[in-house]
Image (cartoon, rainbow, N blue to C red):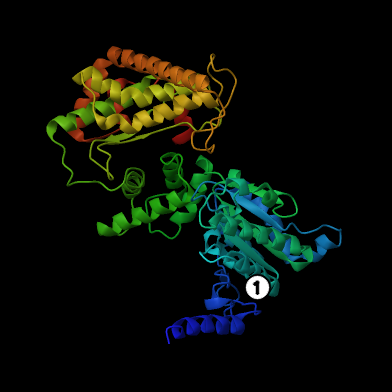
Amino acid sequence: MDLLPTILFFGCIWWASRNTGGRTPTPMGPQGGIFGLSRSNARMYNQENKVKVKFKDIAGMNEAKEEIMEFVKILKNPASFELLGAKMPKGAILSGPPGTGKTLLAKATAGEADVPFLSVSGSEFVEMFVGVGSSRVRDLFANAKKLAPCIIFIDEIDAIGRTRSRMTGIGGGNDERENTLNQLLVEMDGFDSSDHVIVLAGTNRPDVLDPALMRPGRFDRHVTIDKPDIQGRKDIFKVHLKPITIDPNENIEDLSKKLASLTPGFSGADIHSVCNEAALIAAREQKLSVQRIDFEKAIERVIGGLEKKSKLLNPREKKIVAYHEAGHAVVGWFLEYASPLLKVSIIPRGSSALGYAQYIPKEHYLYSKEQLMDIICMALGGRCSEQLFFDRITTGAFDDLQKVTQMAYSIVAQYGMNKNIGNISFKEEGESSFFKPYSEETAQMIDKEVRELVEAAYKRTYDLLTAKKDYVDKLAKLLLEKEVIGKDDVEKILGKRQWDDHNSNFEE
């Protein structure tokens, strides 16, 4: 009798495998494999639930749209390409930072071509059971061939497509991922252009993908989607402002231009969040339309977090924060390559920020050492101001010092801008596995050069603030009085900034 439960258990397993084995699941059909684990979790968009996104709904990525538009032409009229002997590309890798619109572009491709769209995340292929990932890949491609012409989109493909030597895991997780990747490679080799199935994949980390996945014949196109520049942000704002009831006296073109100038470094997702947040703020205040001030508040919310009205600073802490932010502002105003102040507040925001400052950076693609040193000096402005006015330092500069350290290491060890280290570039910490690509002696030299660089920048910043001490004092007192000041307030105290190249890029 003691063996009865064991016999029943294995009998159920045998019966389940007999009744589910050998069947290929479809999105509409029965589940395959035990408990349906081998069935693909891909979400399908077809004639019943069409993808409504079109290329006209996407802005800020014109080059990427042009690159991907070729797939639409091929899916709509494959005969004209096949007549000339051209083979349809099997797929494309869409790479770029989070929030830049990789998934949106893939959906728009399917929407424009009017074909079924199968969307799945790379992490959904791998489970705790061996063989599930491979089965799901087979199932996904089997369904795609039945629905052809169609588009498969694998989001976060780096979850299964990492270089095999880099994969680490315990308990067989590594082998399971490799098996899943191998099956994906086999499936991509197993269909040809006549199947009319295109595979698009999104990733934030194209550098970690396996070379076998990236070679021509699998993913033939590599499309990079960067964060939008000022013109791209303006176009994205125009798209997201359309459904919003804005002030009747406001011109969408002018408003988009102004908001684009206030949001350097924002992704498309950030811009959507700003527009939605502005509408929520206006609704909260029971306004009939969304005004410019609501958008400015929304930008502050996205950058700095929620305003913490309950987080009251004592008078001394408030004074330290004011002088800290004034130090940043003065350094940024008087150094050519630093970013001038746009707005600063000493009202706490987010989980830890005691102050909030927004600057007007110039969008550079190349940086000289002089530019980087000015940026480092500006980051040290808060700490130097505390030292100058209170003769003591606080933890308020923690985030600034992290940025300074990172940038200093990049100058010395990555950009080849240090005489003693020379024209050599090493990977960032954490990119290599266990071994550094340089000797202990070189490591000590790098540390020494970084310290000397930061000390030189600190001295330069301290000397500048000492010379402009009265300006820092006046700015800090105004900040204590008003709590929030803008560029016009700064200009009244510090005078017009000597360099106006930033303004031409970001302001009307």
> Residue 76 or 144: which is nearer the viewer?
144
Residue 187 vs residue 426: left or right?
right
Q: Pick out the residue farthest to the left.
A: 315
Circle 1: residue type: Asn
Indicate the quadrant where residue 191 lies: bottom right
The residue tagged with tag 1: helix, strand or loop? helix
> Residue 371 or 123: which is nearer the viewer?
123
Label 1: which residue?
143
Residue 434 vs residue 262: left or right?
right
The spot of residue 298 in percent (x, y) is 34, 49
Seen at 55% across and 74% down, the residue is 49
The spot of residue 299 in percent (x, y) is 36, 45
In this picture, is 44 found above or below 69? below
In this picture, is 508 found above or below 334? below
Seen at 23% across and 31% down, the residue is 321
> Residue 281 or 408: which is nearer the viewer?
408
In this picture, is 236 found above or below 188? above
Tell me the quadrant of the picture where the N terminus can be found. Answer: bottom left
Asked whether residue 108 appears in the rendered view, the answer is no
The spot of residue 305 in percent (x, y) is 31, 46
